[in-house]
Image (spheres, rainbow, N blue to C red):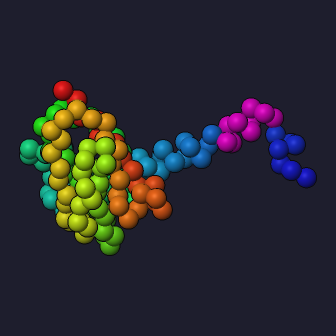
Amino acid sequence: MRISRFLSPALLSLAAAFPVLAGDDDKAAICAEAEERYVEMFGAPSSEAEGVTVVTMYKYNFCPAEITVPVGTTVRWVNVDKRTSHSVLSPDASMPESDRAFPEEHVEFTFLEPVDAQTLCGPHWETQNMIGMVKVQE
């Protein structure tokens, strides 16, 4: 017998929504870990980095996954993973794929025009869904 025969439609819709909610919680926990790793590596929170906006790369995630910045902002993607290397590219912003950033290394790009720029990790965007967004506004 199928389980769905015993569950009400309301319970089925709740069960169907649960993985999405768990995924959001998982990403929040991953990003909290990423910030802890950043502080361990650099001795201060990422929000205190001078002259740049920091996005960490950790466990196949960009943290935060989406940012909004003004034109002229330099975004620094910092690899806080323990073993994995990442790259960053954005066809929307005419940003070619960077070299690989190994743990404790970073990639920077200055956004000079307004754009909604999807950012991808070259080796992990298809297999691990490592995709972010930088919204650049006037």
Q: Residue at position x 63%, y 40% from top?
A: 17
Question: Going 17% across and 50% down the picture, which residue do you hit?
Answer: 109
Residue 122 is left or right of residue 103, and the answer is right
Mark yes or no: residue 36 visible: no
Closer to the camera in the image, 43 or 107: 107
Q: Where's the C terminus, which quadrant?
A: top left
Q: Residue at x 48, y 44 (%)?
A: 24
Front-lying residue, 118 or 35: 118
Which secondary structure class fits the magenta region best?
helix
Q: Is residue 14 left or right of residue 1?
A: left
Residue sitting at the far right: 1
Q: Quadrant of residue 9?
A: top right
> Is residue 133 at least partly visible in the picture?
yes
Q: Which residues are magenta?
A: 8-16
Position of residue 23 measured from the top left corner of the image (x, y, whole percent): 51, 48
Query: Does 134 sit above or below residue 37?
Result: above
Relative to residue 101, is residue 20 depicted above or below?
A: above
